Image: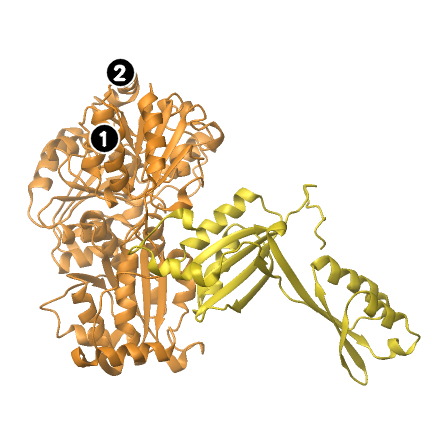
Chain colours: A orange, B yellow
């Protein structure tokens, strides 16, 4: 924006404006955007904002994390369970670069964030000043939008635009970098929400022709299958999705990111897709005649080998982001629209139908999977404790009503398989980026977003140690998350691949772990450790029913493998059951 | 270099001209080019200029050695950038396009008969500047034309050669201004994909 045009805007608004510093304006803008919680970490270049925050602690709840990565993952966890935009603060240089992993995670998993970073004085930009880094340049490939503010007058405009962009259309992270002089200087502040940007049109106009084309395919289908992605959760289209599926009698399978959009006990729910998903939906993807993908992007972990993916099927792709249409899988009918709007239109033109024998095929697959895998995985009688039985018990004990936050690896796949979700927006995980260390801070954010709900953080012993410092945040702010470490003293997923594809050459995957209970004790968080199956039920009950944060370490079988599995490069129908 | 060149797979290389209309904003060049970098697509030429609409810039980007399918995917990702107003793909038949080249040759080569002078005249080039020790020749045309003159001047001692990026206007009747107006008047924040 040119300086002349912004000054014109200032003049027009002058009657309603008040004189404040750039720093205070940042906080006023956040209040205008109904922000309640900020996760952050102070430092030199953001000190003026923290100074202003000192007078705003009655209106804005700032959670001091132990690392900027913790702050950004917490903001993600908050956003994922609330649908609101997560907010985090960090200083320039290392503070800003420490946010990058979380920003990249939010970008690939479509999570709305506004990250505000301090920056060196504008006259020092480009001089390699102390703690100067080009965070706008660094974050460019992993943000939906970013902007550097060098004058206080730009702050309301940048923040309003940032919030609008972050949480409209396909959501994503926004970074706003504010130089220290822009924070310090006073200006005439006024705020106007952003509702339109001429170069940004986040909501496509639904093409009714695409809906009637889709309905034609659906109405003729004998073996339709619907794939449910996170787009359904983002669009809050859960009811419309289920109503549509029930009317047309279509089995529904979920991607990792789509989990919890459909209650797992729904009669038409047929399971979880992808590399470690359920047997039925993977195999039947290559047998269905019409594949209806809603708010998902055909990630390679879902499709396996694209050349052998659903080639027999007509594909209907309902997707808000035009860049996702035809990116991986060519759509026969592309419905470029918000999932809710598309489903509302689609339900009107689809015929009532049932596909009982087709649905039974999925149930037959379920039986095979149960006999070959689930039965022994959830009810073993000998050997060490299995991750699978722990997750099954947690699912039963919470009735699937808790928010499940997972890290990355075997425990994540096991939890996603064995936890029967019964509450919407209750799955928080790092899907696209696969960020180890995501879980603990994301669980804090989830608990801050949904304080009334039980929040369970399921973490492996590897990932736990990547952001273990956030125990300090949990302690200081008394965030009541229930932490479960499934400890196999291995980087289990890598070990599994080494076993299956690298002749058991366990290259740097075995961990000598510290005493987690002692660490937990140091942070004032009560803990238990169990190694015997006989102690599992009592420990889980005590852990789940405790007040405040509590850690439970379960020592599990060292070399447990997650099955089924679609090996990398194989077709989804070549899924291995063991 | 010329349009009829083959790529390493022996396929005929097609040029794609991308015309990207954007807000006039710092950093956009970087945002656009990283989309090509991610896919390891080499940009053959790039030109940024103002348009007839104040505050709107046009990037003209030429890429080769990619399939139509790949170009479409790249263009969709460019359109996603918040400050991009519109992005269009053209093949050579869809646009009028030109490039400009400057050639610096030693003045003394002109003194040895009229060979160079004839060459310049016959190739539709013109002499821009005459200095005591060098002459600057200017030629406008397609890459193959400017390259042709390059080949001919080379044996005579070419001191310096530079060629601009391609600039192109589409053969369609659409006006930039009307397109921008359409974006501004689009019902709230919605747009139909057909509008692109």
- Location of residue B32 in the rendering, given as x and y in whole percent from the top left corner: 48, 59
Location of residue A117 with respect to A260 vertically, above or below: below
Residue A119 drawn at (x, y percent): 34, 73
Q: In this orientation, which residue lies closer to the viewer: A29 or B69?
A: B69
Q: Where is A30 relative to A454, above or below?
A: below
Q: Earlier in the sequence, mark 1 or mark 2?
A: 1
Residue at left offset 45%, top offset 57%: B86
| Residue of label 2 | A360
Quadrant of the drawing holding the N terminus of chain B: bottom right
Between A317 and A256, the one lying in front of the other is: A317
Q: Is residue A85 left or right of residue A327?
A: left
Q: From the viewer's perspective, is the residue at label 1 or at label 2 nearer? A: 1
Is A412 or A23 nearer to us in this picture?
A23
Q: Residues within 10 Å of mark 2 (few under 14, many from 20)?
A: few
Residue A382 falls in image quadrant: top left
Residue at screen point 23% across, 37% down: A344
* Residue on which the image places disc 1: A244
- Chain under disc 1: A
Residue A578 shows in the view? no
């Amino acid at each position: 924006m040119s300086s002349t045009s912004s000054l014109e805007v200032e003049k027009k608004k002058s009657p309603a404006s008040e004189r404040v510093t750039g720093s205070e304006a940042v906080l006023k803008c956040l209040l205008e955007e109904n922000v309640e919680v900020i996760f952050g970490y102070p430092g030199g270049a953001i000190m003026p904002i923290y100074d202003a925050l000192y007078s705003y602690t009655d209106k804005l709840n700032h959670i001091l994390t132990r690392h900027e990565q913790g702050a950004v993952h917490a903001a993600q966890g908050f956003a994922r369970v609330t649908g609101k935009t997560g907010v985090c603060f960090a200083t320039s240089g290392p503070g800003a670069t420490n946010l990058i992993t979380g920003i990249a995670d939010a970008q690939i998993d479509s999570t709305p964030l506004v990250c505000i970073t301090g920056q060196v004085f504008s006259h020092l930009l480009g001089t390699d000043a102390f703690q100067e880094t080009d965070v706008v340049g660094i974050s460019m490939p992993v943000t939906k939008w970013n902007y550097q503010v060098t004058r206080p007058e730009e702050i309301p405009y940048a923040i309003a635009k940032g919030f609008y962009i972050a949480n409209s259309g396909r959501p994503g992270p926004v970074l706003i970098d504010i130089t220290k002089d822009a924070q310090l200087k006073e200006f005439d502040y006024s705020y106007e929400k952003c509702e339109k940007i001429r170069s940004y049109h986040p909501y496509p106009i639904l093409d009714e022709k695409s809906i009637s084309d889709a309905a034609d395919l659906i109405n003729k289908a004998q073996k339709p299958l619907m794939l449910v992605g996170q787009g359904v959760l983002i669009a809050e289209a859960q009811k419309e999705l289920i109503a549509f599926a029930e009317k047309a009698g279509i089995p529904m399978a979920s991607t990792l990111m789509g989990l919890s959009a459909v209650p797992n006990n729904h009669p038409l729910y047929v399971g979880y897709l992808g590399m470690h998903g359920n047997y039925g939906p993977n195999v039947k993807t290559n047998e269905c005649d019409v594949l209806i993908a809603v708010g998902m992007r055909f990630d390679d972990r879902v499709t396996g080998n694209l050349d052998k993916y659903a080639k027999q099927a007509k594909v209907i792709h309902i997707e808000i982001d035009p860049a996702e249409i035809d990116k991986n899988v060519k759509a026969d009918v592309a419905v470029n629209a918000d999932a809710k709007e598309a489903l509302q239109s689609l339900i009107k033109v689809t015929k009532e139908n049932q596909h009982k024998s087709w649905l039974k095929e999925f149930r037959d697959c379920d039986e095979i999977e149960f006999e070959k895998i689930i039965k022994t995985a959830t009810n073993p009688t000998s050997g060490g404790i299995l991750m699978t039985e722990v997750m099954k018990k947690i699912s039963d004990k919470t009735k699937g009503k808790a928010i499940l936050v997972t890290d990355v690896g075997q425990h994540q796949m096991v939890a996603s398989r064995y936890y029967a979700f019964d509450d919407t927006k209750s799955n928080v995980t790092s899907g696209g980026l696969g960020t180890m260390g995501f879980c603990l801070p994301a669980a804090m954010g989830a608990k801050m977003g949904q304080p009334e709900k039980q929040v369970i953080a399921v973490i492996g012993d590897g990932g736990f140690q990547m952001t273990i410092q956030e125990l300090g945040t949990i302690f200081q702010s008394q965030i009541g998350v229930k932490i479960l470490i499934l400890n196999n003293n291995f980087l289990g997923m890598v070990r599994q691949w080494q076993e299956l594809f690298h002749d058991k050459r366990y290259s740097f995957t075995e961990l000598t772990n510290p005493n987690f209970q002692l660490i937990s004790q140091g942070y004032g968080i009560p803990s238990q450790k169990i190694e015997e199956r006989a102690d599992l039920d009592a420990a889980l009950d005590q852990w789940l029913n405790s007040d405040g944060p509590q850690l439970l370490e379960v020592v599990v079988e060292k070399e447990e493998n997650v099955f089924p599995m679609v090996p990398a490069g194989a077709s989804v129908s070549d899924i291995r059951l063991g | 270099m010329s349009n009829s060149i083959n790529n390493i797979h022996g396929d005929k290389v097609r040029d794609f001209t991308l015309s990207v209309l954007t807000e006039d904003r710092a950093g956009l060049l970087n945002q656009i080019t990283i989309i090509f970098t991610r896919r390891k697509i080499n940009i053959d030429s790039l030109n940024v200029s103002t348009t007839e609409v104040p505050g709107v810039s046009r990037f003209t980007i030429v890429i080769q050695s990619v399939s139509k399918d790949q170009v479409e995917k790249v263009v969709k990702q460019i359109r996603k950038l918040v400050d991009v107003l519109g992005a269009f793909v053209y093949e050579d038949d869809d646009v009028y396009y030109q490039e400009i080249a400057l050639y610096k040759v030693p003045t003394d080569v002109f003194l040895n008969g009229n060979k160079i002078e004839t060459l310049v005249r016959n190739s539709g080039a013109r002499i821009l500047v005459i200095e005591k020790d060098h002459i600057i020749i200017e030629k406008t045309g397609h890459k193959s034309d400017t390259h042709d003159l390059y080949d001919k001047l080379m044996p005579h001692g070419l001191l310096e050669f530079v060629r601009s990026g391609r600039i192109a206007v589409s053969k369609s009747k659409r006006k930039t201004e009307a397109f921008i107006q359409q974006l501004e008047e689009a019902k709230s924040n919605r747009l139909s994909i057909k509008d692109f």
